Image (cartoon, rainbow, N blue to C red):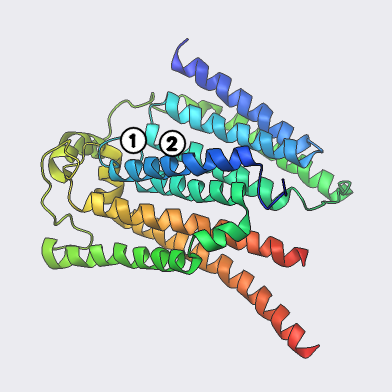
Amino acid sequence: MPVESWLIFLLSFMIVGSIIALEMKDLLSAVISVGVVGLGVSVAFLLVQAPDLAVVQFLFEIFSIIIMVRAFIKKDYHQEAPSKVNKILTGVTLITLIAVFLLSIPLFKLIPTFGEPLMTTSRYYLENGAAETGAANIVSAVILDYRAYDTLGETTVLFTAILGTLTIIRIKKRAKATEEEKS
Amino acid sequence: MKQTEGMTLIVKTVTRISVWLVLLYGIYIILHGHLSPGGGFAGGVIIALAFLNVMLAFGRDFIKNWLNIDMLHDIDSSSATMFIAVGILGIAFGGSFLANFIPHGTLFNLVSSGTIQVLNIVIGLKVGMGLFIVVWALVLFHLDQKE
């Protein structure tokens, strides 16, 4: 089978998985089907020959499943029946999405085939990347040399996220400590 | 046998051996980031997963003694600073921010590609420590709620 039909199979599999994740009453089953969708993304990256992304996606999927199972499973969630406004909003969203999809079908013909023609920038990277940076892995060369500024931003985002998490948790602790002092 | 914190004896014994291999694999992925698929981010996640593995198998109290969480904070923050330091050194020696100023070496060698390897190691440390600290914070949050 060609790569395209594998991709279509995977994408429909992922859509089914996400619908199951939404509809499942049991939280653990829902988390597992979210994980299945993520692993599908990872395999899709492998099929379009992006091993770097596939590795990162695969590892992060495992990581997030562990966090979700550890942090969210034990809490009890109460299930609310959708109200009338909710149902109307869902219908409007669905109709809008379907309309946008149907209207954009002619645009799909304009999309060039995958990986062809080679853009000017990517051709430059492929031809001069190894010589200019000395890195055999072209992805590394792009994210840490040509586009190192982006990576700096990404590192800052991670750093800020960790700072934010710790700050929120510390505030909770401090509030509890002051309460104990008062009582 | 008295049931202690964490999982069963089988899991603990396997973890005791396999965690070092997982850590080694993470370091390998980081150091070979410029040669093979992977790099600082993927290797960092593997290192965080190794710590997570120990935490799941042995329990929270063990990890508190085994790892110095405050030192993880320090490594996390200092590697973020290191990234900027490498960039500023690029201004000094290479002419622009984050310029590749270290000699490149021969292609396909382990020590090659100048600052790319340095930045890979820095990002690996940052991601590994940072992700584990996030998990640790969530665990503490969980403990707070239980009390």
How many labels sit on residues? Answer: 2
Residue B108 lies left or right of residue B78; in this view the side is: left
Which quadrant would residue A177 be assigned to in this image?
bottom right
Q: At which x and y percent is residue B31?
A: 29, 45
Q: Chain of mark 2?
A: A
Q: Nearer the viewer, residue B130 or A117?
A: B130
- The residue wearing badge 2 is A55
The answer to whether residue A61 is visible is: no
Quadrant assignment for the C terminus of chain B: bottom right
Q: Amino acid at mark 2?
A: Val
Q: CA distance from mark 2 to mark 1?
A: 8 Å
Left or right side of A14 for A130: left
Q: Quadrant of residue B99?
A: bottom left
Point out residue A159 in the picture as x, y percentages from the top left corner: 45, 63
User: Is residue A175 shown to the viewer in this render?
Assistant: yes
Q: Nearer the viewer, residue A157 or B137?
A: B137
Chain letter of disc 1 in the image? B
Q: Secondary structure at mark 1?
A: loop
Residue located 74% across and 88% down the image: A181
* Residue that extends furthest to the top in the rendered view of this protein: A1
Where residue A92 sits, quadrant-wise, is top right
* Residue occupying image coordinates x 30% and y 62%: B83
The answer to whether B3 is drawn above or below residue A123 in the figure is below
Q: Is residue A72 above or below residue B107?
A: below
Q: Nearer the viewer, residue B84 or A113?
A: B84
Q: Are marks 2 and 1 in contact (CB under 8 Å)?
A: yes
Q: Which residue is mark 1?
A: B37
At label 1, which amino acid type do we have? Pro
Q: Quadrant of the N terminus of chain B?
A: top right
Q: Which is nearer the eye, B55 or A58?
A: B55
